[in-house]
Amino acid sequence: QLQLQESGPGLVKPSETLSLTCTVSGGSISSCSYYWGWIRQPPGKGLEWIGSVSCDGTTYSNPSLKSRVTISVDTSKNQFSLKLISVTAADTAVYYCTRLPDSTSGGYWGHGTLVTVSS
Amino acid sequence: DIQMTQSPSTLSASVGDRVTITCRASQSINNWLAWYQQKPGKAPNLLIYKASSLESGVPSRFSGSGSGTEFTLIISSLQPDDFATYFCQQYNNYYSFGQGTKLEIK
């Protein structure tokens, strides 16, 4: 059964870089069958797609965040990662890693990790 | 950007009730829509993909329909385990989400 697990600091200082990693088990990123992505939900607000990456490193990002986002993949570790630079309090959210839905299947999500931006 | 409008935001119902949740897209998304169930502190759980395809292992009381801009999730007979939050996700053009429907016990 596919499982995704987010890891990384739960507290980041303003203006610094938020870094998260997603470890995938029960499936292989290198099968190149899907896009993998990051989604976040600020407290009390809706869900927002941050960006996506494929097995070959091709990425797509939400235009509203594109200048601050880097998403990368490490197929040897079956992981993909998110870096968000110059964070502010508005970046405080639960961050989810996901296998994104496509023409043949729906999406699968990790449990999410709360990242708080505060000094 | 494709905006997804989900209604209602809160729904009170009883065990055994039939409930309907609606998602409307700001432009056609064909049938590229998924529905998820989420319980507090847990990962969202896929129920329906491609608007009407039931995910393996999901009870048949859940069904989805629609295409274009209007979609519905129906739970035919509510069970105690179904009280949760439900949200839709379009994946026709990148990804965007409904605001969620919290299904509460009446």
Image (spheres, coloured by chain):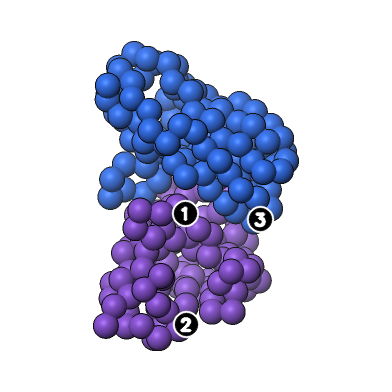
Chain colours: A purple, B blue
The residue lying toward the viewer, choosing from A50 and B57, is A50
Q: Residue at x 28, y 45 (%)?
A: B40
Q: Work out whether A84 lies above or below A27.
A: below
Residue type for callout 1: Leu
Residue type for callout 3: Asp
Pointer 2 chain? A
The residue lying toward the viewer, choosing from A28 and B63, is B63
Q: Work out whether B19 lies above or below B53.
A: above
> Residue A78 placed where, x, y %?
47, 68
Mark 2 or mark 1, which is nearer the start of the sequence? 1
* Co-location on one chain, circles 3 and 1: no
Which numbered circle lies on residue B1?
Answer: 3
Q: Secondary structure at mark 3?
A: loop
- The image quadrant of residue B15 is top left
Q: Residue at x 42, y 25 (%)?
A: B59
Q: Kindly report the distance in space between the C-alpha atoms of the residues bearing marks 1 and 2.
A: 20 Å
Q: How many other residues sit within 10 Å of disc 3, few (<14), some (14-19) or many (≥20)?
A: few
Q: Residue at x 34, y 58 (%)?
A: A43
Q: Work out whether A68 lies above or below A29.
A: below
Q: Are marks 3 and 1 in contact (CB under 8 Å)?
A: no
Of labels 3 and 2, the one closer to you: 3
Q: Is residue A22 left or right of residue A72?
A: left
The residue lying toward the viewer, choosing from B92 and A59, is B92
Q: Identify the residue under disc 1.
A: A47
Q: Identify the residue under disc 2.
A: A85
Pointer 3 chain? B
**Which quarter of the rendered picture does the C terminus of chain B lie within?**
top left
> Residue A73 placed where, x, y %?
53, 73
